[in-house]
Image (cartoon, grey):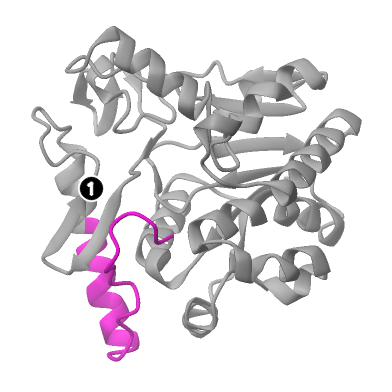
Amino acid sequence: MQNSIFCMVVSKTRLIQAIACFLSLYKTMDNFKVYILCVDEKSYEFLKEINLDEIVLVTISELNREDLLEIKSSRKLNQYCWTLKPGFIKYIFTLDETSERVTYIDSDLFFYQNPNIIFENQPDASVLLSSGEIFLPMYSKEFNQTMQTLTGNYNSGFISFKKDIDGLECVNWWDKMCIESCTSNPEDNKFGDQKYLDDMPFLFNNVYEITTPGINIGHWNYSKYKFTVLNDNILVNNNKLIFYHFSGFRIINKYDIRQVHEQDRVNIPFIYQVYKRALGKIMDDVENIDPDFKEYITINAVDDN
């Protein structure tokens, strides 16, 4: 059976969440592989030490991209990590001749069901985009519309490319655009790597929004959904939750894990506490493996990655 291939870009401050993301895939899937691009030596050395069969580690130098190396010093860490995403996907297509599709996943995703159903439901799609619909009922309709315009219609935390003409042309274009600019500049109609996704359906063939329900729910829209449990499955509006996007979580220490975007929110989904406990357990395991590794602790709550 063909392996499902995923990839993520990981820094030391996102290592704990990346491990949680991987373990959630491990629990829900068979025959998968995760390529991890480590942006610093600390994350690389730790993941190398635990040596998991389903993980393939890659360093930035292995991409063999002078343009990516040249712009590193001029971009903030989060902007640089965004910039790396399409180039990393291209690298995997070249490196892994068996790859038929590569799916980028943010390290703060957590899977509750096998995500292969997403691809099975839309097998002919060359590019699959996750909706980034904003639904914040505590704010005005105008505010929601403004935020949607600023951030774009899609979320780049889960984006999938097939190795065909349309998929490769699209990821090549995205790579070029991210090299040119990966800032969050509303005046220039930019929002990191993400706003470019709005143009993909108009520039390339076979680009589709994911139709499978239960994906990419996050702090920007969870108020749309009723979270329940049935037969050990988490449901959102009676559909199985496939993955949740825990964007905005920052680890201050093992006992202080904050959601920086939702400090004044109420009716937060119950899965938040479960996720925090999972991160705490992973921190315990990391401490047992390497008691000196504390680089996952975040000081700057916003600009780290």
Q: Residue furthest front?
A: 187
Residue in the image at 62% along x and 71% along y: 73
Q: Is residue 254 something one can see in this rendering? A: yes
Q: Is residue 40 above or below residue 240?
A: below
Residue neighbourhood size for the residue with mark 1, other residues' Cα within 10 Å, grouped as few (<14), some (14–19), many (≥20): few
Residue in the image at 49% along x and 37% along y: 114
Residue 110: horizontal and vertical position, in percent?
A: 38, 45
Quadrant where the image shows the N terminus: top right
- Relative to 270, is 70 on the left or the right? right
Magenta span covers which residues?
278-305
Residue with the mark numbered 1: 260
Q: Tag 1's secondary structure?
A: loop
Quadrant where the image shows the C terminus: bottom left
Residue 304 falls within the magenta-colored stretch: yes
Given the image, on which type of amino acid does mark 1 rest? Val
Residue 166 falls within the magenta-colored stretch: no
Compare residues 20 and 247 and report the one nearer the observer: 247
Q: Is residue 300 above or below residue 209?
A: below
Residue in the image at 49% along x and 57% along y: 78
Residue 112: horizontal and vertical position, in percent?
A: 37, 39
Residue 190: horizontal and vertical position, in percent?
A: 58, 35
Q: Is residue 47 above or below residue 134?
A: below
